[in-house]
Amino acid sequence: MELFDKLKILADAAKYDASCASSGAPKRAAAKGGLGSTTGAGICHAYTPDGRCVSLLKILLTNACLFDCAYCINRRSSNVRRARFTVDEVVTLTTEFYKRNCIEGLFLSSGIIRSPDYTMEQMMLVAKRLRRDHGFAGYIHLKTIPEASPWLIEQAGLWADRLSINVELPTRASLERLAPEKNGATIETAMGQMHERISEARAEKRRFSPAGQSTQVIVGADETTDTELLATSASLYGRFKLSRVYYSAFSPIDHASSLLPPKPPPLAREHRLYQADWLLRYYGFSIDEIAASSAGGMLDLTIDPKLAWALKNRGVFPVDVNTGPRELLLRVPGLGARAVDKIIAARRHTRLSAADVQRLTVSFKRAAPFLIAADHRPVRLTDRADLSRRFARPAQLSLL
Amino acid sequence: MVTVAVTLKPGADLDGFRKAVRALIARDVAPEHVVWQSEAALSLFGEAMADESAPVALSRAACELIGHVVCHRDAERYGLLYTLVWRMTHGEPALLDVASDPLVFRLAMMEKAVRRDLHKMHAFLRFRRVEGSDGERYVAWFEPDHFILEATADFFVDRFRSLTWSILTPVGSLLWDGETLTVGPPARREDAPPSDDFEAGWASYYASTFNPARTNVAQMQKEMPKKYWRNMPETKLIPYLLRSAGSRVETIMKKAPDTPRRKAPTEAVLAIEDAPKTLAELNAIITAAEPFVHGGKRAVLGEGPLRPAIAFVGEQPGDQEDIEGRPFVGPAGQLLTRAMAEAGIERDACYVTNAVKHFKFEQRGKRRLHQKPTTGEVRHYRWWLMKELELVQPALVVALGATAVLALAGKALPITKCRGPARFGAWPGFITVHPSYLLRLPDAAAKRAAYTAFVADLAKARTLARKAIEAAA
């Protein structure tokens, strides 16, 4: 098979992994004779028509796999076309695309062939060759195989900027039903091992997966509610200090398994989960608060979770931009953390009017009913019964 | 007061602006009395002000803002920036904190536009490879919105240092020969190659990584506006991808679930046995692996018979061990061998190994100075040590020194307190000092006493090992 034909198959097979971040690595520049750099923030080199960014060359080493996970297009029982790259082919694709400034680096994952150790060794060989033979200083994200021997994880962190293991299913029961060869305890042990090594290396100022570890949970392939999903993430963030939990709305795949629900979840659900995830991590919200403003454990798809909470807790508002504490300003719908910081810096020197606040946030219209400014008081707005309707987007109409 | 006219070079003239600001502030010229002009011919603003005035002290944030905003295409940029400097030096030093101030807001928006332009140039510029008589070159054509060409140079040099490349734009060009950067004249699109041999591969990657079930054109265009498309080869596919997305998803959704062609993996998965089954297999893995410490490149493996009475675990190989590739052959090793003999232990009947398999050192001139492995480094090696002991199956494991204890017990323990019998997971153990500790003692009497205690420890370990063997039998 031609190289680019394999690329088609093995990129198609890798696209269901939501992670593509190239951020979090320490700043690096190419050494003499070397290739590549990292900027810390990461760069998206293109966007596909699904609105997702293309930052890393996201491919599988092979899409052949021993395992039979129902949600995965590459599962053993799938009739999908199979292909396999050699180590050198992946190295060539990475360096050639990189030299043309198409990518920030490589995201390498793989189906499990022969054995977990063998597969993991092949993936590591790619990373090692890039770093050693090509002086490659770009970003490398390696998907770790939790079933592989523990010393392979130790080695992988020497080459990679980020390691990740996907938990995929938020509960043990779903894992048993949909991914019978996977073992929740094995996954958590491996995540724990990576977390220990990453934090030790940070404390000792050594290089070991400097951009940390991340994971992915599939949304909508089982019955798990949003509250349960967020609780799972909170527990993962807490125990393993993950850089990110990615939510991937289960997407209809070719050659689907009969164990899967026939219809994918609305994409808005994934979006709301990300918003709630941010509220938990950066805005001081608790799971219980999010749960209390959800219905039946599910986030409202028509309004964002912060607004949902605000509407249920109208008594807290309005907040005065000139005197309100930071924690409360962070709870105002339409005010992001950066806008809040700007408000706090500015109000030390001046009294903020509505026009001033308008210059500090792009969504002043959303924030206005919840704010008091020097010349602005939303007297009746927060009491209005139709407030949530004012914010909800009109439902999309279908053509008959 | 008369109006002062300042003429700067076209584009982003940070140097000229800086000189002008110094001169204007030194002469206390208010912003409303300055007219800013750009002209191709470099003519500074009047003889009287061409001298070097003292620098103006500004916050770091202000300097960074100025650096970005001078790249903006807006002709008013210098006037706005000078007003900012004036106000900051005339009673409003914290002006930048007031992000709601109309001037600060406008400058922040301009800075944001320049940053975005820089970011998009880093992201969307594409090189094409050209094979010439003097080797390969990479050439790109890009059309930035603002005067950012020179501001972007560091990024591309850092990233593509070993390549020869040129970036062509309508307002100027950058040329990098692998050593030096040259700023060249404006170029035309035709000066860049139209395609290259990897572009088809990139396009097919782009098409394959798109998920037709999640089409979201607005999001794509928000981040990658159409104005960039004509210089990005992969975007030619967008119309086709969008046209076919609907029918592709429909086909997938209509398909009945697959009947699997291959049998379930249960047996295959059960048959997987990855862990090494012999010491030789494990040693091959260790030898091939990358060191976790900086220094010695060769792994110094454990040595001795299987199922020994005692396995001794030290810290790491030293200089001599690294040279010979064998454990405990340097000064500390020789001392250990002597003490073992005095305690009635035959060294060849024991297994000797180290917690860390590579020599960690710092090069000082010709000498390689031993460095203690960190806790994290010891943990990296720990799996191998545990597997090694599992395969060697000693009756007793003796930990020599703190590093060995850390590796065997999984946590740091004070040697002085824990010296004596211990338990390391499945193995009966014994904790004593590392022989190198004896070598380091400066006082001869203390050295003698410590040596005697060490020999006594080894004798106790010997007794323990015998008991363990008897108990097992």
Image (cartoon, coloured by chain):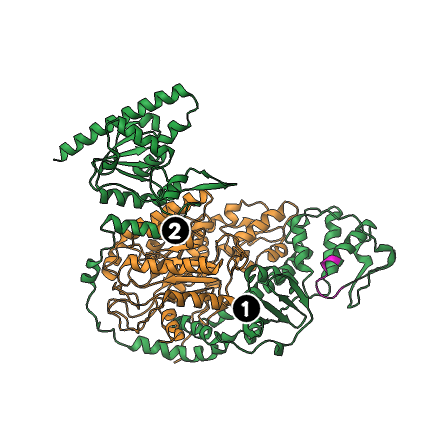
Looking at the picture, tell me which residue is in the foreground, A156 or B29: A156
Image quarter in which the C terminus of chain B is found: top left
Residue plotted at (36% across, 21% down): B448
* Residue A202 x %, y %: 45, 45
Looking at the picture, tell me which residue is in the foreground, A307 or A267: A267
Which residue is the site of mark 2? B290
Q: Chain of mark 1?
A: B
Disc 1 residue type?
Phe
Q: Name the side, left or right, on which B345 lies relative to A27.
A: left
Disc 2 residue type?
Glu
- Dividing the picture into quadrants, the one containing residue B248 is bottom left
Q: Name the side, left or right, on which B247 lies relative to B262.
A: right
* Same chain assignment for discs 2 and 1: yes
Task: Identify the element where label 1 is drawn.
Answer: helix
> Which chain shows up in green?
B
* Residue A354 x %, y %: 61, 55
Q: Is residue B463 above or below residue B47?
A: above
Classified by dominant secondary structure, the portion drawn in magenta counts as loop
Residue A338 appears in the rendering = yes
Q: Is residue B274 above or below residue A101?
A: above
Image quarter in which the N terminus of chain B is found: bottom right
Residue plotted at (26% across, 73% down): A79
Which residue is the site of mark 1? B124
Task: Identify the element where label 2 is drawn.
Answer: loop
Label placed on residue B71: none
